[in-house]
Amino acid sequence: MLSVLACLLPMTGCMDDNVASSGTSGRCAVTAVALGGMHVRVNTVTPAGNDTSYLTTLSGNYTPMQIDQRGLRIYNRDSLPMGTIVSSVAFSRFTADGVLALRTPAGIDTLFSTSDSIDCSQPRTFVVYATDGTSKKEYTLTLNVHQQEGNEFTWGRTASALPDLASLVKPKAVALAGGVLGVYGLQSGVPVFLKATTSEADEWTTVSLTGDVAGFEPRSVVGMGGRLYANGDAGLITSADGLAWSTVPGGLPVVAVSTDSLFAIQGDAFFSSADGSNWVRNAHDADGVLPTSDYAAVCTPSTMYEAYEDLLLTGVHEEKVVVWKRNLDRLNHNTYPWTYYTPTEENTLTLPLMTSTTLVPYDDKVLAFGLSAAGELESYISSDGGRTWKDEASGYTFPVVSDPTDISAVSDAEGFLWIVCSGSGEVWRGRLNRMSWSEDDGAFERNVVQ
């Protein structure tokens, strides 16, 4: 080490920021690292449908580098975008207590300067020598680059031609605790529950429901407070295990649910209840346009306030789709009315009329699935809480489903979307690639350069 240090020390006068102080010291550590600008190759498709690519520039400020002083690692916790060119990387900052050297592939330590660009397509070794020649530290620098396009879906068909699912009428998919995927529906008018684990989604079992299930409406099933609720001939019914159901005294037919309340429409008014038996009338801002059938609802965390939720309800009124929204303050400091999204000539991106409409929260958006008049799967995306809806051409892609008669969809805790299809008996599972990316636990000393 002393011979290498002797060669390096005479050159320290021409370094830019590699030595933190003058004189000699026993300290040796990398103290800060920041990437410079990098090129990214982006693959795309021309309007004519031809594949093409172009280069763009990514600022290193968007990718902080981490320094693990215990493990002697330098790396980026947030991976660089797919297509980032790391065969020639420049650093805007690379400082150390001591003399900083880069080890070449041939094993020779050479003085390093931020004016140099280096090949980081493989891990590189940086060595810091104490200026008094007593010690050194060797760091391994790794640049992580995504190998998948983050905003692309990866889909797979986990089941096909399942007889019990193929014959199911009005399916309602639910994601339950313990990694259980379930589907409620009717078989020859009899209410049943199909279930599988998300890890073995090709093995399904079918169970008949018991109790007050006459007139059971599968698509009305919602969950709140560890219980399930649904509508039937007896009115509102509830279940602790999803199989045995009993009548809720004083219940109203449920159309939506938030974290702590059920919601119903009775006459021309909205109502809410914390227990299903005691109901409070809700104010609303437009009369004569409440949905009367084909209800679909979703509750999402508010993008404005941590203690708020946004409840979105769609349905059909006089053969037209209507969309309602209510802001919910879970601390009960403020009470807001239901708001009707009035159609306007300026808004051409309204939710179309579909059958089997299902709303699913996903990726901080709301997805709407349904069947067109031709019986084909359709999907729409809303990024503004249900006011406007774009079709899948806006970025997401979904599978081609074979001859469905009914569909339902649900998202689970692992970031997967599930689409179940009556008629074809298919089950599809998909996930945005970036929803599967995990971060390092960060349980070490690190330096983040903004």
Image (spheres, grey):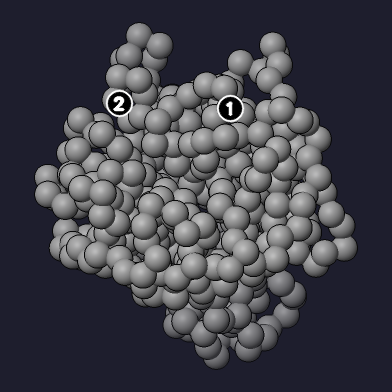
Task: Tell me: 183 left or right of 96.
Answer: left
Residue located at (56% from left, 52% from top):
253
Return the x and y of residue 64 as percentages of the image width and height.
Answer: 60, 58
Residue located at (29% from left, 25% from top):
375
* Residue position for label 2: 376
Q: Secondary structure at mark 2?
A: loop
Residue 9 or residue 438, whichever sits in front: 438
Cα–Cα gap, marks 1 and 2: 23 Å
Task: Tell me: 47 left or right of 364.
Answer: left
User: Which label's residue is closer to the chain start, 1 or 2?
Assistant: 1
Res 195 visible: no
Q: Secondary structure at mark 1?
A: strand
Residue located at (30% from left, 19% from top):
374
Crowding at label 2, few (<14), some or many (≥20) Cα neighbours within 10 Å? some
Q: Amino acid at mark 1?
A: His
Residue 336 or residue 238, whichever sits in front: 238
Tell us which disc is closer to us: 1 or 2.
Answer: 1
Return the x and y of residue 335 as percentages of the image width and height.
Answer: 84, 54
Task: Tell me: 248 left or right of 354.
Answer: right
Above or below, 164 against 49 in this view is below
Return the x and y of residue 37 as percentages of the image width and height.
Answer: 58, 42
Q: Amino acid at mark 2?
A: Glu
In what quadrant of the picture does the C terminus appear? bottom right
Residue 290 or residue 249, whichever sits in front: 249
Answer with the quarter of the image where residue 329 lies: bottom right
Above or below, 257 against 40 in this view is below
Answer with the quarter of the image where residue 14 lies: bottom right
Answer with the quarter of the image where residue 287 lies: top right
- Tally of marks: 2
* Residue position for label 1: 317
